[in-house]
Amino acid sequence: MGVAAPKGVHIFTGTDSYAAFQASKAFVAQQAVQHQLEIEAYDGDGESGEEALEQLKAVWEALVTVPLFGKGRIVWWKHVDLLGASVFFRNPALLRVWQNLLEVLSQGTTPYFRLVIHARALDRRIAALKDLLANAMITRCDRVSPGSEEESDEIAQLEEQLQKLGWEPEPGVSEWLFWATGGDRGLLEQELAKLAVYPSGDRRLTRTFAATLVPVSRGGDLWGYCDAVLAGKLDEAWDSLQRLLALGESEIGLASLLAAQIRLAARTACLREAGLLRLVRRGSTVLAEVDPSARALLVRSKSGELPSPWRLGRIATRSQRLPIQRWVRAVERVEWLLRELVTQDLPRVLLERATLELCQILS
């Protein structure tokens, strides 16, 4: 039989662990000031069952020990992997301490403590977590989805930060920097810190210059490959493709992503020619405004979202440089590639050949 639901427990988790950590840190600081609480922090839960057990004991002891001078206490347990690893809960000793911890949290007989957990992983299927999660406050911090409104907001904020640092990002650089880091807020902050102290008289931030400072992630290479093909830049497309294939990326996966971008470029070209799409510049970012009557022609994501104004603007800017007939040819060629990848051998050769042909069509 489980214990009652815990009280005063706040869990910060999500696919963006850095953002979850920062949110938990800000919450702890705010609570400490607002309620005059002393802070006791514990970092991680070790790399083994024994280390996890010792850290769990330390957290439990912090919760059962009355703070000095009758003040309250907020226990901040950060960088925790335990809540996502069911194997730890097979340890009888750890499970006993866990039950003791839940009993303390469920009593609610003292105002002395609050428990804040930054969970780098959280698996709701673990039976031992049922009581903890029942009434705990859970805040999720997830990475933004490509094409979502949140993506546009994140990129706009990044551009503002670059401008505050005295840089003048050229069109498209903020977007490239965002995806070169995979949208990882932790990596972005590190790169911004480098740019803040970089001794440069020329404050124009070009993509070429940014690429010399920022290590490109898998996400950056994926979008870099697609962007280069859409721009007809064979050298850039070829380099990105070879890096992705060396990392073990699926040929059919790369072709599917590229096909989606080319189809969207063809649609934006048609909509623009029909007067149903116009481009609006905001700072160095170009957004696309689509007539409501034409939105049904846009392909929604798996989550049901339409492409964001930023992504549409990004693609439409590239598509407007060529006549529609070129984009029709590109769509036909990428559709051929998808069929061949399903029915033929040598997928790498097929993808490389199609990349060469598409760059020629779109150059």
Image (cartoon, helix red, strand yellow):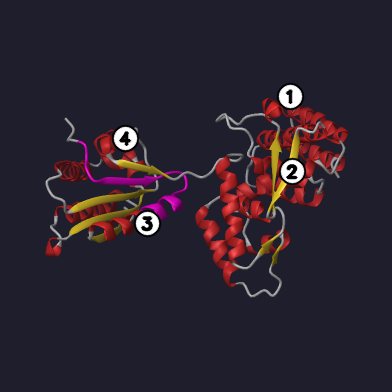
- Could you tell me how far apart the alpha carbons at marks 2 and 4 are, in whole angstroms? 49 Å
Residue 12: say if magenta. yes
Q: Give the range drawn in magenta.
A: 5-26
Which residue is identified by label 4? 126
Which residue is disc 2 drawn over? 279
Give the residue at x 69% y 55%: 284
Residue at 78% x, 44% y: name it. 318
Magenta residue check for 132: no
Between residues 246 and 268, which one lies in front from this camera angle? 268
Choose the circle earlier in sequence order: 1 or 3: 3
Mark 4 surroundings: few (<14), some (14-19) or many (≥20) residues within 10 A: some
The label nearer to you, 3 versus 4, is 3
- Of mark 3 and mark 4, the one earlier in the sequence is 3
User: Does the residue at mark 3 contact the one at mark 4 (Cβ under 8 Å)?
Assistant: no
The Cα atoms of the two marked residues, 1 and 2, are separated by 40 Å
Measured as percent of width and height from the top left, residue 119 is found at: 36, 47
